[in-house]
Image (cartoon, grey):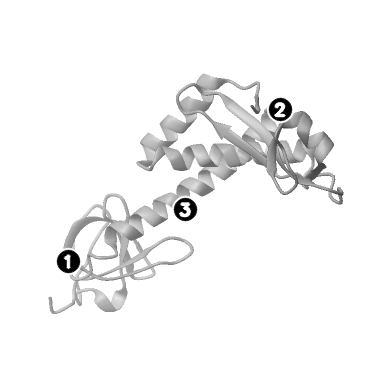
Amino acid sequence: MATPIAANKAELLAIANAVASEKMIDKAIVVEALEEAIQRAARARYGAENDIRAKLDTQTGDLRLWRVVEVVEVVEDYFKQVDLKQAEKLQKDAKVGDFIVDPLPPVDLGRIDAQSAKQVIFQKVRDAERERQFEEFKDRTGEIITGVVKSVEFGHVVVDLGRAEGVIRRDQQIPREVVRNGDRVRALIMKVVRENRGPQILLSRAHPD
């Protein structure tokens, strides 16, 4: 078995639960981000050349850390390979060609590692939110939707749709209509485009429909 990491179990689970709840995304995505952050911290400690894995038990909070190594006849990469004699110390029935688990000692998750974890989690959460928004709106083209004007930027109206934002570009607005922040507006969903910064939900108030 891989070695449990000395970390605050309750805190790890609390972070995962809080982020998942606040952002309305699958807890598994947050847990995956935590595991990835731990893996980064461990590679920084033991060497980036290692194939290091981490697993968080979402029931108990136990976090286990290990290195994956391949059993070979002649070792060429000491970070990712072991010979049969060494492998049998880790797994009695090991044979050449197997990939086995080499438990690693606990890692102290210091302030730097915590900062790294936050960055990984926030990125994963952003990616998950963007994907959720795209999935929610991609098949709603042609639908009339109501939202609240969030801002008017360079003549384009940004509309808060609840769990996403839409944009009414200048050429899709009603001529001479003036809208202000906080106004409720109805618009047609013209197009939903997937972009790196998130889905672009293009709205129209001038469309014939």
* Residue depicted at 84% across the width and 49% down the height: 77
Q: Secondary structure at mark 3?
A: helix
> Callout 3, which amino acid?
Asp
Residue type at numbered disc 2? Val
Give the labeled residue for mark 2: 107
The numbered mark, 2 or 1, whose residue comes first in the sequence reads: 2
Q: Secondary structure at mark 1?
A: loop
Which residue, given by chain and number where applicable, does mark 1 sit on?
Answer: 143
Residue 107 appears at what percent x and percent y? Answer: 71, 27
Q: CA distance from mark 1 to mark 3?
A: 25 Å
Residue type pointed to by label 1: Glu
Residue 127's tag is: 3
Compared with 76, 64 (above or below) is above
Q: Are marks 2 and 3 in contact (CB under 8 Å)?
A: no
| Kind of element beneath mark 2 | loop
Closer to the eye: label 2 or 1: 2
Give the CA separation, mark 2 to mark 1: 52 Å
Q: Nearer the viewer, residue 142 or 185?
A: 142
Residue 158 against residue 15 in the figure, above or below: below
Give the residue drawn at x 35%, y 60%. Answer: 134
* Number of residues whose C-alpha sits closer than 10 Å to that of mark 3, classed few (under 14), some (14–19) or many (20 or more): some
| Residue 195 image position (x, y, % from top left) | 44, 67
Image quarter where the C terminus lies is bottom left
* Quarter of the figure with residue 183: bottom left
State whether residue 119 appears in this view. yes
Comes first in the chain, label 2 or label 3: 2
